[in-house]
Image (cartoon, rainbow, N blue to C red):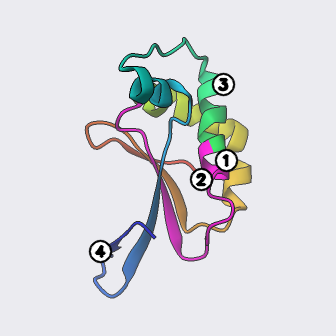
């Protein structure tokens, strides 16, 4: 568990697991060399990358957990076209995973639920 938050009702704690939305080699390349380029990526590929980020947590507990994909440094992952493509292609799959909710947290407080 990465963090907890008080629920709006105040009675329960929300259990939150956070992972990065962008799992490409770009960040690794940046850390190793000090520079990197991000290739042009299609909307479908970005949606598939969100699925990969969710799959990376497959061995972690899910019941009672809110999974948050951190896209604050990955603006392209948080674009409405990408989240809509994810919901269309992977939304039914995401709803079967057992999380309380799966969210994408982008820049400027942009938060989108992916499993609805």
* Rendered location of residue 109, percent (x, y): 28, 44
Which label sits on residue 115? Answer: 2
Q: Identify the disc placed on residue 8.
A: 4
* Residue contact at pointers 4 and 2, CB within 8 angstroms: no
CB within 8 Å, label 2 to label 1: yes
The CA distance from mark 4 to mark 3 is 35 Å
User: Which of disc 3 and disc 1 is earlier in sequence?
Assistant: 3
Number of dots carrying numbers: 4
Is the residue 35 above or below the residue 79 in the image? above
Q: Return the residue at label 3.
A: 44
Query: Magenta stretch?
Result: 53-74
Which comes sooner in the sequence, label 2 or label 3? 3
Q: Residue at x 41, y 31 (%)?
A: 74
Q: Secondary structure at mark 4?
A: loop
Q: Secondary structure at mark 2?
A: loop
From the image, state whether disc 4 or disc 3 is nearer to you.
3
Query: What is the distance, in whole Å, between disc 1 and disc 4 at their CAs?
Result: 26 Å
Location of residue 91 in the rendering, given as x and y in whole percent from the top left corner: 67, 47
What is the quadrant of residue 70 in the picture?
Answer: top left
Q: Is residue 85 above or below residue 99?
A: above
Q: Position of residue 72 (x, y in %)?
A: 35, 38
10 with respect to 68 (left or right): left
Quick check: is 62 in the magenta stretch? Answer: yes
Residue on which disc 1 sits: 91
Circle 4 packing at 10 Å, graded few (<14), some (14-19), many (20+), is few
Q: Residue at x 74, y 51 (%)?
A: 93
Q: Upstream in the sequence, badge 4 or badge 2?
A: 4
């Amino acid at each position: 568990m990465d963090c907890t938050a008080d629920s709006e009702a105040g009675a329960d704690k929300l259990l939150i697991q956070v992972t990065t939305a962008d799992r490409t080699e770009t960040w690794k390349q940046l850390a190793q060399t000090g520079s990197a380029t991000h290739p042009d990526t299609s909307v479908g590929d970005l949606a598939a990358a969100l699925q990969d980020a969710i799959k990376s947590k497959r061995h972690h507990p899910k019941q009672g957990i809110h999974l948050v994909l951190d896209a604050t440094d990955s603006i392209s992952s948080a674009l409405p076209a990408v989240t809509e493509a994810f919901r269309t292609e992977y939304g039914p799959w995401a709803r079967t995973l057992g999380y309380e909710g799966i969210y994408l947290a982008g820049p400027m407080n942009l938060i989108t639920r992916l499993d609805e």
